[in-house]
Amino acid sequence: MSSESEIITLIPGDGIGPEVCDAATQVLDASGVAIEWQPVEAGAEVLAKYGSVVPEGVLNAIRKTGVALKGPITTPIGHGFRSANVVLRQSLDLYACVRPVRNIPGVDSPFKDVDLIVVRENTEGLYSGLEHRVAPGIVESLKICTEHACMRISRYAFELARREGRREVAAIHKANIMKLTDGLFLECARKVARDYQDIQYRELIVDNCAMQLVRNPSQFDVLLLENLYGDILSDLCAGLVGGLGVVPGANVGEDCAVFEAVHGSAPDIAGKRVANPVALVLSGAAMLRHLGHMQAASNVERAVHVTLSEPRNRTGDLGGPANLDQITEAIIQNLE
């Protein structure tokens, strides 16, 4: 690799993670951008070896390169170790989770005019997993909200809206019930909104927003949400355009950014070469754009769109016959 190569931390993850990571790196290497990948281990399989699903060496590697591409990592349900995603986001202060949700030509979906961006606060709130057992049969979960975090995610959303030429930011909340925590979130969003008179601002209660999304998603532009609401509604939004297999994701902080597919590790199909790599490929395109390689990023996205316009190139989750290797090869061919 030349001295001008982009040095990027690679976290293959587990389950289908290593397979889709391999596919994504093949596509990104074919984009014309010189990349030096630096693989590191994280996930359930390294817990016994390092005592953590995200060893300190992984965090240091990302701090050094400033950017990472990450495959999915398994998180146990109801027991076991803490989510690796939460550890990464909190340890590296990746406070903004950004998920663009757009229709891809040729991919069947309930709506044809979806083009929105979910901006989710990533470091606090109920999703942080601050729980403890009060007494036998009684557990408590804490929702922590700070003015600092609410102000910076609000400003991030408005800055993104201005940069992307978006018309509106909608703050999503449950302040009618959680008057202090979500009330603080709204106070901060309103304060920031006053500095962006060129961008419209409105507020919706989270349950109403869920209903509005499945009735008329084209009314939304940028959604600003606290942590748990953002996690739930971003998956709902993915369902509007074909599912988690076609939606990219980024976790952005002041000093680092981690780009990832938003789907799970799907251990039931691991090793079968049938996984869909598109979400991670598109996350890789977003990473290229983050690094300033605008044309290469656009080329990768165009190649994905051209590939998926052909039914024979779609994987099983998209109703097609293609396997992982076939769709990867098709994307690379359409990139060249």
Image: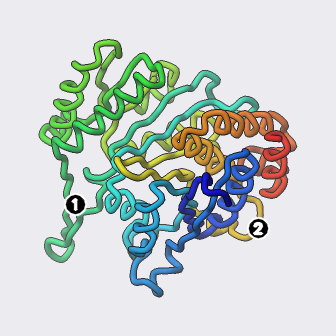
Query: Is residue 264 something that shows in the picture?
Result: no
Query: Which comes sooner in the sequence, label 2 or label 1?
Result: 1
Dot 2: within a 10 Å radius of its alpha carbon, few (fewer than 14), some, or many (20 or more) residues? few
Q: Nearer the viewer, residue 118 or 160?
A: 160
Q: Within the image, what quadrant is residue 81 found in?
A: bottom left
Count of labels in the image: 2
Q: Nearer the viewer, residue 321 or 45?
A: 45
Q: Is residue 1 left or right of residue 163?
A: right
Q: Residue 250: where, in percent of width, then height?
A: 48, 46
| Marking on residue 160 | none
- Residue drawn at x 22%, y 36% as measured from the top left: 151
**For the view shown, which residue lies furthest in the top direction?**
198
**For the view shown, which residue lies furthest in the bottom direction?**
49
Looking at the rendered structure, the kind of residue marked 1 is Ser
**Callout 2 touching callout 1 (CB < 8 Å):** no
| Marking on residue 141 | 1
Q: Which quadrant would the N terminus be assigned to in this image?
A: bottom right
- Residue drawn at x 43%, y 62% as measured from the top left: 64
Looking at the rendered structure, the kind of residue marked 2 is Lys
- Residue drawn at x 84%, y 39% as measured from the top left: 311
Dot 1: within a 10 Å radius of its alpha carbon, few (fewer than 14), some, or many (20 or more) residues? few
Q: CA distance from mark 2 to mark 1?
A: 39 Å
**For the view shown, which residue lies furthest in the front direction?**
3
- Residue drawn at x 79%, y 45% as measured from the top left: 331
Nearer to us of marks 2 and 1 is 2
Does residue 142 lie above or below 98 as drawn?
Answer: below
| Marking on residue 272 | 2
Query: Is residue 170 something that shows in the picture?
Result: yes
Does residue 303 lie above or below 95 as drawn?
Answer: above
Q: Secondary structure at mark 2?
A: loop
